[in-house]
Amino acid sequence: MSSAERQALVEQYKAGYDEVLRALDEFPKDALTAHPIAGKWSAAEIVHHLADSEMTSAIRLRKLLAEEHPLIQGYDQEAWAAKLRYTARPLAPSLAAFKAARESTAQLLETMSDAEWKHPGWHTESGPYHAEKWLQIYAAHAHGHAAQIRRLREALGS
């Protein structure tokens, strides 16, 4: 990956929180826990997932930067959604956690060396892993969920 490609992904990553906020902006507040698309998470569940995923991803990047042979542990996002009460919690703390993790991690992304981007680690589910692979995943992650929130809103007829 070139430096310019990497920087474009960093900019996309940094814009992810605002993209999710825009998707939530016109979402009916009384429908945040609705499931208008069968088998898909509600908008509230997506927000809680983003917070947990973002905090997890922030630790993953830090492990890739600070550890010699980092092991990146996968997790069952469906189990987290059920066991961490994604349907019964207020959104504001999760939005704040999502934002803070993104901002803190973006500071690191802006200062990383070429060697740090390529420093090898191992992911328990996908094998060889490094910060560039991490960035490819998380630059698009929030945007993908923002699009999912928009589809939910459309399905509600709002």
Image (cartoon, rainbow, N blue to C red):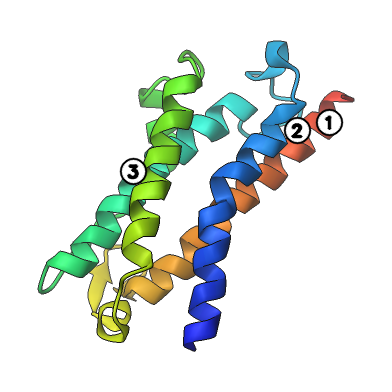
- Label 1 to label 2: alpha-carbon separation: 5 Å
Mark sitting earlier along the chain (1/3): 3
Secondary structure, mark 2, is helix
Q: Residue furthest toward the right?
A: 157
Which amino acid, mark 3?
Met
Secondary structure, mark 1, is helix
Q: Is residue 86 above or below residue 127?
A: above
Q: Which residue is under mark 1?
A: 155
Q: Nearer the viewer, mark 1 or mark 3?
A: 3
Q: Is residue 102 above or below residue 121?
A: above
The image's mark for residue 55 is 3
Which amino acid, mark 2?
Leu
Question: Mark 1, residues whose alpha carbon is within 10 Å: few (<14), some, or many (≥20)?
Answer: few
Residue toward you, 80 or 29: 29
- Label 2 to label 3: alpha-carbon separation: 24 Å
Which amino acid, mark 1?
Ala
Query: Quarter-wise, where is residue 72 in the image?
Result: bottom left
Contact check, label 2 and label 3, Cβ < 8 Å: no
Question: Mark 2, residues whose alpha carbon is within 10 Å: few (<14), some, or many (≥20)?
Answer: many
Contact check, label 1 and label 2, Cβ < 8 Å: yes
- Label 1 to label 3: alpha-carbon separation: 29 Å
Q: Which residue is under mark 2?
A: 152
* Image x and y of residue 146, in percent: 66, 43
Query: Quarter-wise, where is residue 148 in the image?
Result: top right
Mark sitting earlier along the chain (2/3): 3
Q: Is residue 59 above or below residue 38?
A: below
Residue 61 in the figure: left or right of residue 152: left
